[in-house]
């Protein structure tokens, strides 16, 4: 084999030029376009990742705003509910106080009526005591008693 190479030594520079041309042609026709496509793809991927990051940040900010709004609405609802409860409680106390005053006045009025009726009944009973005593004595003695 060395003998063949020594006899055909002039093919070596031709082969070297052919390999160099073949490498240059492959680089120009295949490797550069493929590298260009890969670079563009990497660039688009980087841009998409950056856009995704900004979208994620934007979405996170909007979510935080939404949660803050929901929390504030919840607090406002609680404030409104508490105010309504306090108003209802005040109204209840007011009506109870009015009812107590009305019932107290009615109770006093009825007590006065009862006292008046009690006095009238006592007067009437006081005037009938001699007749009751006479009737009881007649029943106990079994005969008529002189009054």
Image (tube, rainbow, N blue to C red):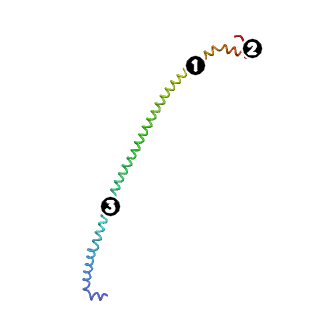
Q: Position of residue 135 (x, y in %)?
A: 70, 15
Residue at position x 59%, y 17% in the image: 120
Of residues 27 and 98, the one nearer the viewer is 98
Mark 2 or mark 1, whichever is nearer to me: 2
98 to 127, vertically: above or below: below
Closer to the camera: disc 1 or disc 3? Answer: 1
Q: Nearer the viewer, residue 37 or 94?
A: 94
Q: Nearer the viewer, residue 131 or 92?
A: 131
Q: Is residue 69 left or right of residue 114?
A: left
Q: Determine the image quadrant of residue 119.
A: top right
Cα–Cα span, label 1 and label 3: 100 Å
- Chain-order first, disc 1 or disc 3: 3
- In the image: residue 79, left or right of residue 119: left
Q: Is residue 20 above or below residue 8?
A: above
Checking the image for residue 143, the label placed there is 2
Q: Is residue 126 left or right of residue 112?
A: right
Q: Quadrant of the C terminus?
A: top right
Instruction: Name the residue at the right extreme.
Output: 142
How many other residues sit within 10 Å of disc 3, few (<14), some (14-19) or many (≥20)?
few
Q: Are marks 1 and 3 in contact (CB under 8 Å)?
A: no
Residue position for label 3: 48
Q: Which residue does the image show at 72% across and 15% down from the upper left?
A: 138
CA separation, marks 3 and 2? 128 Å
Residue placed under numbered mark 1 in the picture? 117
Looking at the rendered structure, the secondary structure element under dot 3 is helix
> How far from the left and from the top, in percent, is residue 15?
26, 82
Describe the element under mark 2 as helix, strand or loop: loop
Please tell me the numbered disc located at residue 107.
Answer: none
- Do callouts 3 and 2 mark residues in contact (Cβ within 8 Å)? no
Q: Which numbered disc, 3 or 2, marks the residue that appears first in the sequence?
A: 3
Q: Residues under labels 2 and 1: Cα distance? A: 35 Å
């Amino acid at each position: 084999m060395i003998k063949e190479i020594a006899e055909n030594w002039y093919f070596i520079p031709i082969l070297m030029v052919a390999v160099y041309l073949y490498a240059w042609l492959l680089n120009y026709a295949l490797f550069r376009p493929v590298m260009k496509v890969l670079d563009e793809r990497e660039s688009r991927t980087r841009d998409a990742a950056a856009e995704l990051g900004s979208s994620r940040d934007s979405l996170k900010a909007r979510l935080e705003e939404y949660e803050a709004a929901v929390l504030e609405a919840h607090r406002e609802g609680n404030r409104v509910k508490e105010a309504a409860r306090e108003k209802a409680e005040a109204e209840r106390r007011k009506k109870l106080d009015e009812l107590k005053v009305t019932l107290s006045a009615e109770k006093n009025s009825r007590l006065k009526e009862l006292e008046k009726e009690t006095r009238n009944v006592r007067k009437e009973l006081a005037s009938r005591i001699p007749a009751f005593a006479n009737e009881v004595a007649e029943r106990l003695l079994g005969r008529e008693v002189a009054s």
